[in-house]
Image (cartoon, rainbow, N blue to C red):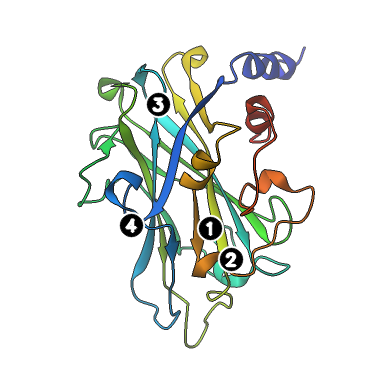
Amino acid sequence: MSRAPWCALVLFLFVAPATAATLNLRWNACLGDGGAVNRSFACDTNDGQQTLVGSFVLPSALQHVSGTEVALDVVLAGSTLPAWWQFKNAGACRQAALTWSTDIPGSAEHCVDWASGQAVGGLAGYKAGAFGPNSARIVGVSAVPLEGLADLGATTEYFAFALVLHHMKTTGNGACAGCRLGACIALRSIKLTTPVAKNDRTLVPAADSQVDHDARRVTWQGGAGVVIPPGREKLECSFSYRERATPLDRLLALY
């Protein structure tokens, strides 16, 4: 008899419970260190990079954290996802231009690396068209060795990741179009893993908190022209959006 149904049942039983927490996303620095909400770029060079910094605050302590699984949503102005925002996948115009880092910004003062410098990780997925032709889902992961398991407390802002957008193929021969378009990027969830799956915790924003919603959302080029069509609330980048989905709805939407 096939073991697949049993595997599916086990995965269902150990889906990490969703916990309302504070999720933060800012350019260049953690929220507590004054990271920026918007990043504007003249799109006139192939050198350099822009960095998004993600962090979180737990509502209660969690012991033996071994890793993170992070999901972000991206929505672009216009009707399609432009070439400049096509990453990772074979044939993408800027395949190598998006990278994942577990290195906390050198200027950090008010946020703490949850992994104390021991985490390794990478960009696990980039799903173009995840919620429509002008959207994408980014997934990144990190983990520490068993001897590096972390006991995390409440109220501390913990650095989780840095997402780096490199400028390559922005201008000149072979340039990928779309850099100047407005975009919205939202930190959707952070799953904290442990050696015991039932103790894993998926962090999502409080459903009724506009402050929490704003803290985990940033714009590119001012977000000009970004429009969320009716019925696409789960894109979570609408500038007038207040979440109506339950934590379970949001969790199941990740799979």
Q: Is residue 236 visible?
A: yes
* Element assignment for label 3: loop
Discs 2, 1 touching: Cβ within 8 Å: yes
Q: Residue at x 65, y 33 (%)?
A: 250
Disc 2 crowd rating (10 Å Cα; few below 14, some 14-19, many 20+) is some
Q: Label 3 to label 4, Cα distance in Å?
A: 22 Å
Q: Is residue 102 visible?
A: no
**Residue type, mark 3 in image:** Leu
Answer with the quarter of the image where residue 97 lies: bottom left
Please state the horizontal and vertical placement of residue 160, each as a whole percent of the image.
37, 39
* Element assignment for label 2: loop
- Reading the image, the residue beneath label 3 is 58
**Residue type, mark 2 in image:** Ala
In terms of sequence position, does the residue under pointer 2 or pointer 4 come before the other?
Answer: 4
Q: Label 1 to label 4, Cα distance in Å?
A: 22 Å
- Reading the image, the residue beneath label 4 is 28
- Reading the image, the residue beneath label 2 is 92
Q: Residue at x 59, y 69 (%)?
A: 224
* Horizontal side of residue 157 vs 226, given as left or right: left
In terms of sequence position, does the residue under pointer 3 or pointer 2 come before the other?
Answer: 3
* Element assignment for label 4: loop
In terms of sequence position, does the residue under pointer 3 or pointer 4 come before the other?
Answer: 4
Quadrant position of the C terminus in the picture:
top right
